[in-house]
Image (spheres, helix red, strand yellow):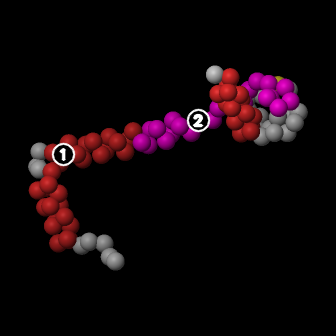
Protein backbone atom coordinates (compact mmCIF):
# COMPACT_ATOMS: atom_id res chain seq x y z
CA UNK A 1 0.00 0.00 0.00
CA UNK A 2 1.46 3.33 -1.03
CA UNK A 3 0.81 6.83 0.23
CA UNK A 4 -1.75 8.93 -1.63
CA UNK A 5 -0.34 11.10 -4.40
CA UNK A 6 -1.35 14.53 -5.69
CA UNK A 7 -4.81 13.79 -7.12
CA UNK A 8 -5.80 11.64 -4.16
CA UNK A 9 -4.75 14.37 -1.71
CA UNK A 10 -6.91 16.92 -3.55
CA UNK A 11 -9.90 14.59 -3.35
CA UNK A 12 -9.33 14.00 0.38
CA UNK A 13 -8.98 17.75 1.04
CA UNK A 14 -12.14 18.45 -0.98
CA UNK A 15 -14.12 15.90 1.05
CA UNK A 16 -12.80 17.39 4.32
CA UNK A 17 -13.80 20.85 3.07
CA UNK A 18 -17.31 19.60 2.31
CA UNK A 19 -17.68 17.86 5.67
CA UNK A 20 -16.35 20.61 7.95
CA UNK A 21 -16.92 23.73 5.87
CA UNK A 22 -14.52 26.52 5.01
CA UNK A 23 -15.08 28.49 8.21
CA UNK A 24 -14.38 25.55 10.53
CA UNK A 25 -11.13 24.34 8.94
CA UNK A 26 -8.90 27.10 10.40
CA UNK A 27 -10.44 26.56 13.84
CA UNK A 28 -9.88 22.82 13.54
CA UNK A 29 -6.25 23.26 12.49
CA UNK A 30 -5.63 25.77 15.30
CA UNK A 31 -7.11 23.48 17.94
CA UNK A 32 -5.04 20.53 16.66
CA UNK A 33 -1.86 22.62 16.86
CA UNK A 34 -2.70 23.82 20.36
CA UNK A 35 -3.43 20.26 21.51
CA UNK A 36 -0.06 19.11 20.17
CA UNK A 37 1.72 21.97 21.93
CA UNK A 38 -0.03 21.18 25.24
CA UNK A 39 0.86 17.50 24.86
CA UNK A 40 4.55 18.30 24.37
CA UNK A 41 4.52 20.66 27.36
CA UNK A 42 2.85 18.01 29.50
CA UNK A 43 5.42 15.41 28.48
CA UNK A 44 8.27 17.76 29.43
CA UNK A 45 6.71 18.70 32.77
CA UNK A 46 5.68 15.15 33.62
CA UNK A 47 9.24 13.83 33.57
CA UNK A 48 10.66 15.85 36.46
CA UNK A 49 12.71 13.73 38.84
CA UNK A 50 11.58 13.77 42.43
CA UNK A 51 14.30 14.53 44.96
CA UNK A 52 15.60 11.61 46.99
CA UNK A 53 16.72 13.83 49.86
CA UNK A 54 15.76 12.74 53.36
CA UNK A 55 15.79 9.51 55.31
CA UNK A 56 15.68 6.23 53.44
CA UNK A 57 12.33 4.50 54.10
CA UNK A 58 14.07 1.13 54.17
CA UNK A 59 17.00 1.72 56.57
CA UNK A 60 16.50 5.26 57.92
CA UNK A 61 19.92 6.63 56.88
CA UNK A 62 19.97 10.16 55.42
CA UNK A 63 20.25 10.25 51.62
CA UNK A 64 21.61 13.29 49.74
CA UNK A 65 19.48 14.79 46.96
CA UNK A 66 21.93 13.96 44.15
CA UNK A 67 22.51 10.37 45.32
CA UNK A 68 21.71 7.48 43.01
CA UNK A 69 21.74 4.88 45.81
CA UNK A 70 21.20 4.79 49.56
CA UNK A 71 24.56 4.66 51.38
CA UNK A 72 23.14 2.32 54.03
CA UNK A 73 21.10 -0.35 52.27
CA UNK A 74 22.11 0.20 48.62
CA UNK A 75 18.56 0.68 47.32
CA UNK A 76 18.28 2.76 44.14
CA UNK A 77 16.91 6.30 44.10
CA UNK A 78 13.87 5.10 42.13
CA UNK A 79 13.09 2.49 44.78
CA UNK A 80 13.41 5.07 47.56
CA UNK A 81 11.08 7.57 45.83
CA UNK A 82 8.56 4.82 45.00
CA UNK A 83 8.51 3.62 48.62
CA UNK A 84 8.09 7.19 49.93
CA UNK A 85 5.20 7.76 47.52
CA UNK A 86 3.61 4.44 48.50
CA UNK A 87 3.84 5.29 52.20
CA UNK A 88 2.40 8.78 51.62
CA UNK A 89 -0.49 7.35 49.61
CA UNK A 90 -1.30 4.71 52.23
CA UNK A 91 -1.22 7.22 55.10
CA UNK A 92 -3.54 9.66 53.30
* Residue 43 placement (x, y as % from top left): 49, 41
Q: Which mark is residue 48?
A: 2
**Left or right of 57, for residue 92:** left
Residue 15 sits in quarter: bottom left
Up the image or down, 31 lies above or below 92; here it is: below
Q: Residues within 10 Å of mark 2 (few under 14, many from 20)?
A: few
Residue 54 on the magenta segment: yes
Q: Is residue 75 left or right of residue 3?
A: right
Where's the C terminus, which quadrant? top right
Horizontal and vertical percent position of residue 74: 85, 39
Crowding at label 1, few (<14), some or many (≥20) Cα neighbours within 10 Å?
few
In this figure, which residue is indicated by the disc labeled 1?
A: 26
* Residue bounds of the magenta highlight: 39-60
Q: Residue at x 74, y 26 (%)?
A: 53
Point out the residue furthest to the top here: 92
Q: Residue at x 27, y 42 (%)?
A: 31
Task: Give the secondary structure at mark 1.
Answer: helix
Task: Give the SS element for disc 2.
Answer: loop
Q: Which mark is residue 59?
A: none
Q: Is residue 42 a member of the stretch shown in magenta?
A: yes
Amino acid sequence: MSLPGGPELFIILFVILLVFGASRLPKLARSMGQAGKEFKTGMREGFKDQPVEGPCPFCGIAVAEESKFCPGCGKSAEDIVAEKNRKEASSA
